[in-house]
Image (tube, coloured by chain):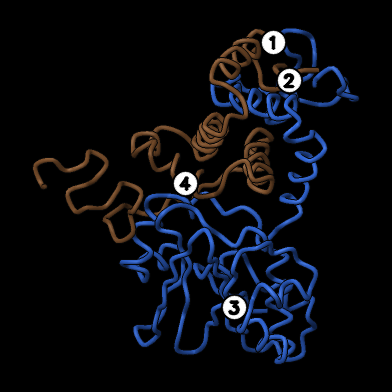
Chain colours: A brown, B blue
Amino acid sequence: MASTIHPMSDTDGRRWHDMGGQDAGPVPMEGHDFALWEKRVDALMVLCGSKGLFTVDGLRRALEDMGEDAFEKHSYYERWIAAVNQNLIEAGIYTLEELGTRMEEIAARGPTYGEAQNG
Amino acid sequence: MPHDHPDHAHDHDHGLSPSGHPYRADNDEPLTYWQRMEIAVRELLIEKARVSPAEITAQIEVMDARSPANGAAVVARAWSDPAFKTRLLADAGAASREMGFDIGPLNLIAVENTDSVHNLIVCTLCSCYPRNLLGLPPDWYKTREYRSRAVREPRAVLREFGVDLPESTRIRVHDSTADMRYIVLPARPAGTDKMTEAELADLVTRDAMIGTGLARTP
């Protein structure tokens, strides 16, 4: 079994997100106020959950499957919107093509978050 | 959205956008891929009548209204009312609901600091936090450093937060899950016997309810 270990597993059998007890440096104390887009991601997650479109377990599964690289490279709500989006596509709420088309339209609206809002 | 901005004369360092409109705070950085995804997901959910704009606005207002002040009010009540404290330690969700706080379906557990025991909260797997009572977690709570070390060397982590406990104090670390969240009931500081509940609440910090801090002394 050891020679065919699943690539998601570390050698100690834990997945990357199961980080309790590992060595790490000092706790970084700097924080930030949440931007509107981050608050919207949070709100969408809560609302999709309360409407039964997916569960918190679905969110976590997508976050964990992104892997450690995504954890290091992307911010918390960047990973959250990716996980929300993945769950909604899997649930058939919209298609990947609809998402891609819309994201291209949004890029054409303007260079900033504020200007890229519709209306 | 800039088109409905009512205050074109407001004082803003960044001036006007290329299209001649004032920027809004937090919205004036270059649009990122992930922000485009948020806009797209939100618009598609609205168009498909899964979520309404009013619901999104209302949910953001609900989260904005949640702050450590809510938890501090619960702690101050527990310090002032022994019967409430008993109920809080038995079922923190039910006791918090008594005070009008919406705890949702999650299981909330209050753990009490005493002369001999200090409690610390972490979520090693992700970012679970008593958000319905305290609002969104601080950034450090979600870092690899805190998640990894809080369960292994809590004394060292606490010293980084300026809390140096005697070796005789037992430290209990509670690892949260999506379904089970913890809040620390800090020890009531000495010299507070005559204080009102509102005055007591001012002594209770966010970190005191996570366990990375102690209640302020008056």
Dot 3 corresponds to which residue?
B185
How far apart in space, not on screen, are marks 4 and 3 (Cα)?
Answer: 29 Å
Q: Which amino acid, mark 3?
A: Leu
Q: Position of residue A29 (x, y in %)?
A: 48, 52
Give amino acid for label 4: Arg
Which residue sits at x=39%, y=34%? A70
Query: Which chain does the residue under circle 1 lie in?
Result: A
Q: Which marked residue is nearer to the observer: mark 1 or mark 3?
A: 1
Determine which residue is flagged by label 1. Answer: A109
3D distance between C-alphas at marks 1 and 4: 32 Å
Q: Which mark is residue A60?
A: 4
Tell me: B212 left or right of B36.
Answer: left
Q: Choose between A112 and A11: the one closer to the eye.
A: A11
Query: Reading the chain from its start, which is encountered first: label 1 or label 4?
Result: 4
Q: Image quarter for residue A54?
A: top right
A36 over B93 or under it: above or below: above
The reply to whether callout 2 and callout 1 are in contact (CB within 8 Å) is yes
Left or right of B36 on screen, residue B168: left
Is the same chain shared between marks 2 and 3? no
Residue topped by disc 2:
A117
Hey, which residue is sitting farthest front in the picture? Answer: A92
Are the numbered discs 4 and 3 placed on the same chain, yes or no?
no
